[in-house]
Image (spheres, rainbow, N blue to C red):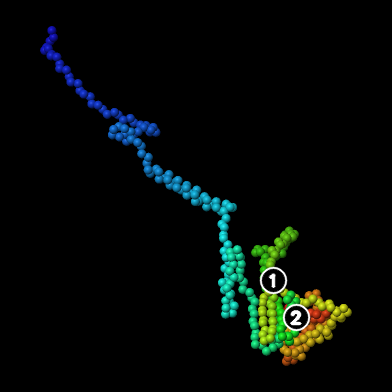
Amino acid sequence: MPIGKAKGPKAPKEKKTKKEKPPKEKKVKKGKGGPGPEAVDEAGQEKKKKFPILMLIPAVVIIAAAVIIFVFVLPGRNADKDPDATVSVEPESPVLPTELPVGDEKVPGMVLEADEFAAQAVLAKTITYTYTDLVDSGKAAETYVKQLKSADPRYYVVDEELVRQREQPDFKTGEGMVLMARNLPKPEPEVVESAAPEGEESGQPEGSEAPQSPPPEESAEPVDETPDMVITVRISWSPGQCVVTADEILGKVTAPPPDTTGSMGQRPIGQQGAQDRISSMTPAELGLPGESMDQYVVFPIDGVEMVDDVACIRVNVYSREDGTNRFMGGYLVSSDGLHLYRQDPSTDEIEILK
């Protein structure tokens, strides 16, 4: 028999209800594309991942910069290298004077189209004066010719080819014309002195090698020569008036060719002939002051001098005034008596008189 109190049957124990635990969230390793805890909403569904807006800004800036470079910068750099890129310039009408003054009146100026874009309006140097109310216009013209012959520098009676004439027109006629001209002096060319380079010593030092031949000189560039210019004075006379027209033109006053007509057997003039030739001329024709050659002493010089390949006899002229016998100039008469030259006493320059 069992010892002690008999135990009654135990009441059945109530089973405890287990609490349901929420499912554990799985950790996602780095680098694997699983949704994180923040990617799941309250209903347990996976949230859609949002692309960050800040990452779009650099990309937009880079794309815009690339567009600017390709559209604006690169075409500008290649524009100069492109041989086909030319700028067409439309011709414009030349700018010319709209009015031409003539005395107290004005004449409309010439109007040109754009195809004459290179045209210019150059004011001519011609000047014309009309002397009116003259008693004897022929005599007035003759006096003016003598005035120009004695001017400094003097003028010569020439033809239309600027060749000096030995004869003068007849000023006693009612109408006539005479042309006079003189050469304009040319400007003297500039002389550039070549200086030795610094540090270069003249002469060869002792013991130096034999001097080498200088290098060949470089051919100088051609220099445009100044053209020959002439001042002309055209004198036209008619009853009661003289018209004087002065102008500056291209050309050169030249001496007439030797007159070979009837020269067969002609003997050349000597010292006496040259002296008589100068004594028979007027002071104005010789470029001397005064009215008569009686106030001068004409003295021939022995020997012959060549001028323009022509043999000439020298004749010196001295002044009688105050008994000083002052030298007034030297004249050279060609041996054929056709040419006459004057040598300036101050510059020794020889000029053609006839």
Q: Position of residue 9 (x, y in %)?
A: 14, 14
Q: Residue furthest bottom?
A: 322
Q: Which residue is mark 1?
A: 227
Q: Secondary structure at mark 2?
A: loop
Is 265 placed left or right of 255 in the picture? right
Q: Is residue 157 visible?
A: yes
Q: Which residue is mark 2?
A: 353
Q: Report the front residue among 113 and 57.
A: 113
Q: Position of residue 194 (x, y in %)?
A: 68, 67
- Three-letter code, disc 1: Pro
Q: Report the front residue among 262 and 269.
A: 262
Q: Residue at x 12, y 10 (%)?
A: 3
Is 311 placed left or right of 208 in the picture? right
Does residue 303 sit above or below 220 in this rendering? below
For label 1, the crowd category at 10 Å Cα-Cα, with few meaning under 14, some 14 to 19 and many 20 or more, is: few
| Nearer-N-terminus badge (1/2) | 1
